[in-house]
């Protein structure tokens, strides 16, 4: 919070990000609502989900291209303008006489292009953010941005549902377009100030090929003992967090007497609110509260909490699940921020976008793989066997984390 209040450039940079995030969520909800009214709504909703998720897997390529971009602020502005034009086109399409399915397909393609550009923009923003706030305040800045984004994500969904009562789909598309344009002007404002200072760090570019860049990122990260292992552990813990969230509704359906609060739908929604609140609090206040705690200890605490959550699900105690699941979300948010801080201080600035992009790709890939595996087992053999498998994975991961922590401690001594 302090870095947001004291650093005007970070304040503008953050508001630009919050604006585009809000617009995106509002339009996504509108598109899902429109698609749900089609005859074959299942296919339409599936295509929208794919168009939203696949571009996120391009983060490593977006980061690589961003590292090769010299004038990052100017490019960030141009990407915002392009996304403004894309969603303006969507707004126009919604007021034409195109058939419903043709309209949805065209909007999905445009949305896919916009989100792919978004992966590139994220890669551009990462090294700029480090330069704006400095390595020392990066953890606090990222935590604040992540926490506010969680709040916006929740509030924008309720806002979108309300706006749909008196605004058209076209209106929401134009609102989304305008948020990108406003964000672009804020990026320009920050960029002009840094241009005057002639800061060479901003203009650093990566002149290596993709494979060579990945090798360099790996080599630099490997020099820091335990960093690569922590990256993989956090990716796995994020997957565990998502998997638990997928298993809880199954447990609730099977053990209604001890798992239901008010009714089934309310219970499922409450679980989502609890984990979202935990992630928000961990992001906003974690970097300050756990500043002196090492990332290794944070990860060990997270894994212990994940085991407790799985055990609570095994005995079907919803109150205990909500308590430890909340704490787990807080802890993993703190661990993720500390990991990003460690990467920022380890990897060269000119390949930072590529490294963070690779990290995001790993994080995004592990969660669906683990969730699909465990939930499939729950469907075939029963949820208790799935919980046993998940507990086994958690215990093994905890053993590895403790071992890495002890090795790191011995190395430092």
Image (cartoon, grey):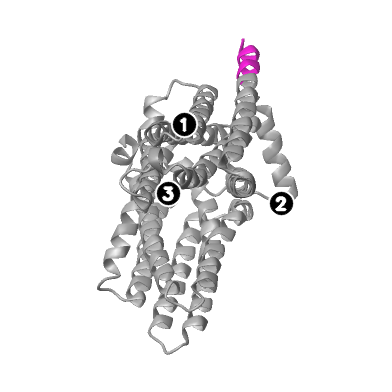
- Image location of residue 78, percent across then percent down: 48, 65
Q: Residue furthest top?
A: 413
- Which quadrant does the N terminus fall into? top left
- 406 relative to 323 in the view: left or right: right
Q: Residue furthest left?
A: 166
Residue beneath disc 2: 210
Q: Is residue 351 above or below residue 407?
A: below
- 54 relative to 166 in the view: left or right: right
- 280 relative to 241 in the view: left or right: left
Identify the disc placed on residue 372. Answer: none
**Does the residue at mark 2 contact the one at mark 3 (Cβ under 8 Å)?**
no
Identify the disc placed on residue 312. Answer: 1
Q: Is residue 210 above or below residue 144?
A: below
Residue beneath disc 3: 194
**Majority secondary structure of the magenta segment?**
helix
Residue for point 29% across, 60% down: 159
- Image location of residue 278, percent across then percent down: 38, 37
Q: Residues within 10 Å of mark 3 (few under 14, many from 20)?
A: some
State the residue in front, 81 or 386.
386
Q: Is residue 407 magenta?
A: yes
Q: Is residue 322 above or below residue 92?
A: above
Q: Measure the C-alpha gap from mark 2 to mark 1.
A: 45 Å
């Amino acid at each position: 919070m302090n870095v947001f209040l004291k650093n005007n450039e970070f304040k503008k940079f953050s508001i630009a990000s919050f604006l585009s995030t809000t617009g995106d969520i509002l339009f996504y909800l509108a598109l899902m609502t429109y698609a749900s009214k089609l005859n074959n709504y299942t296919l339409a909703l599936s295509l929208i989900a794919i168009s939203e998720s696949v571009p996120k897997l391009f983060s490593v390529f977006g980061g690589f291209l961003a590292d090769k971009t010299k004038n990052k602020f100017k490019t960030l502005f141009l990407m915002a303008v392009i996304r403004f034009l894309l969603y303006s086109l969507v707004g126009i399409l919604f007021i034409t006489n195109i058939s419903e399915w043709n309209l949805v397909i065209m909007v999905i393609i445009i949305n896919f292009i916009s989100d792919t550009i978004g992966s590139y923009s994220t890669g551009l923003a990462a090294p700029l953010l480090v330069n704006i706030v400095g390595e020392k305040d990066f953890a606090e800045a990222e935590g604040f941005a992540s926490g506010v984004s969680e709040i916006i994500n929740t509030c924008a969904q309720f806002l979108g549902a309300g706006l749909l009562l008196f605004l058209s789909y076209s209106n929401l598309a134009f609102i989304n377009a305008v948020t990108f344009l406003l964000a672009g002007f804020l990026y320009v404002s920050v960029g002009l100030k840094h241009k005057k200072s002639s800061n060479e760090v901003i203009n650093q570019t990566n002149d290596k090929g993709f494979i060579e860049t990945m090798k360099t990122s790996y080599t630099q990260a490997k020099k820091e003992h335990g960093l690569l292992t922590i990256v993989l552990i956090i990716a796995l813990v994020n997957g565990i967090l998502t998997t638990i969230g997928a298993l809880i509704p199954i447990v609730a359906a099977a053990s209604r007497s001890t798992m239901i609060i008010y009714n089934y739908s309310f219970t499922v929604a409450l679980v989502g609110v609890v984990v979202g609140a935990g992630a928000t609090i961990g992001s906003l206040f974690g970097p300050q509260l756990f500043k002196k705690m090492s990332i290794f200890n944070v990860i060990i605490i997270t894994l212990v909490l994940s085991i407790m959550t799985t055990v609570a699900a095994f005995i079907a105690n919803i109150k205990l699940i909500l308590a430890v699941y909340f704490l787990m979300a807080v802890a993993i948010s703190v661990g993720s921020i500390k990991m990003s801080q460690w990467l920022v201080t380890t990897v060269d600035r000119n390949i930072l976008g590529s490294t963070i992009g690779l990290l995001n790709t790993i994080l995004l890939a592990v969660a669906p793989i683990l969730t699909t595996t465990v939930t499939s087992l729950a469907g075939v053999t029963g949820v208790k066997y799935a919980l046993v498998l998940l507990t086994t994975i958690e215990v093994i991961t905890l053993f590895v984390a403790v071992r890495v922590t002890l090795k790191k401690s011995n190395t430092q001594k």
